[in-house]
Image (tube, rainbow, N blue to C red):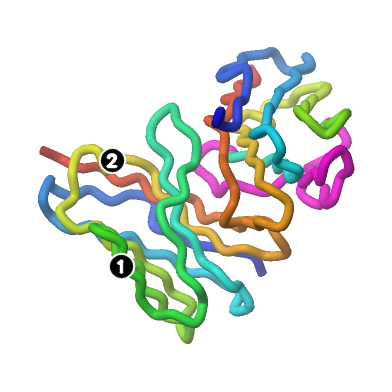
């Protein structure tokens, strides 16, 4: 199947860490992606991880990949109000993206 | 470098009417993709152009949707006649030949509301 599943909503306080989780189905995906959509804006590629890695860190972002369980997570350290957005995980299949439903991250001051 | 431009940004039409969405990719990008997000659900692939040719249109929901990319530059997506379930946000993306998904640049999307 092509399902990519995410929880729909996460609320955190400013300064806390946020963890957004995702499960995917296609074990042959070479790369897995996290996109961010701010209100009124397009989809911005935040980060991606190659499938033979289990972790990737990029400043405040940490991506963890558990290939055995087909589980991907995005951790945002020191979450700021500017991080409020919808976060989509995605896998690539035959040159196209298969997205999850998106997780709305609400950051309270 | 100008980004991917989509217009209109919003469109509200009545059921049964026709709407045409336009996407201007980044200049020189041979790959052009259409995706859409029906409210609250996942973003789904619609189709992929390489220059003016349809490479993959497996995601087009039905024959009320017609996509064109004459001359291999901008693309249009026409919905005729529009139905209520067509409401959602339509995204366009483009990339250079050979770049694949990591080279995608998305536009801001067109929010279509069918009433």
Q: Determine the CA span between mark 2 and mark 1.
A: 20 Å
Residue for point 68% across, 48% down: B96
Q: Which callout, 2 or 1, points to the residue nearer the camera?
A: 1
- As for residue B63 lying within the magenta part, the answer is yes
Q: Is residue B22 found left or right of A53 in the rendered image? A: right
Q: Foreground: B56 or B59?
A: B56
Please identify the quarter of the rendering in which residue A4 is found.
bottom right
Element marked by disc 1:
strand
Q: Which residues are magenta?
A: B38-64
**What is the chain letter for disc 1?**
A
Q: Is residue A53 left or right of residue A95?
A: left
> Residue B73's spot in the image, x, y percent?
78, 30
- Assign a secondary structure to mark 2: loop
**Compared with residue B107, is residue A43 higher up or lower down, i.e. above or below?**
below
Quadrant position of residue A92? bottom right
Which disc number belongs to residue A57? 1
Residue B66 visible in the displayed image:
no
Which chain hosts label 2? A
> Quarter holding the C terminus of chain A?
top left
């Amino acid at each position: 199947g092509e399902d990519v599943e995410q929880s729909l909503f996460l609320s955190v306080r400013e300064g806390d860490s946020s963890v957004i989780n995702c499960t995917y189905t296609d074990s042959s995906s070479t790369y897995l992606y996290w996109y961010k959509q701010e209100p009124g804006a397009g989809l911005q590629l935040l980060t991606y991880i190659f499938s033979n890695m289990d972790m990737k860190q990029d400043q405040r972002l940490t991506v963890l990949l558990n290939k055995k369980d087909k589980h991907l997570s995005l951790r945002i350290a020191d979450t700021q109000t500017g991080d409020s957005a919808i976060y989509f995980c995605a896998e690539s299949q035959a040159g196209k993206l298969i997205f999850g439903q998106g997780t709305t991250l609400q950051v309270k001051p | 470098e100008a980004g991917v431009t989509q217009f209109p940004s919003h469109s509200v039409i009545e059921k049964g009417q026709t709407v045409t969405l336009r996407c201007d990719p980044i200049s020189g990008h041979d790959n052009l993709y259409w995706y859409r997000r029906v409210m609250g659900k996942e973003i789904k692939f619609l189709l992929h152009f390489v220059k003016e040719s349809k490479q993959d249109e497996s995601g087009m929901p039905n024959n009320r949707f017609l996509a064109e990319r004459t001359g291999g530059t901008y693309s249009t997506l026409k919905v005729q006649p529009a139905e209520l379930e067509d409401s959602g946000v339509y995204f366009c993306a483009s990339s250079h030949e050979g770049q694949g998904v990591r080279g995608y640049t998305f536009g801001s999307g067109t929010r279509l509301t069918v009433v």
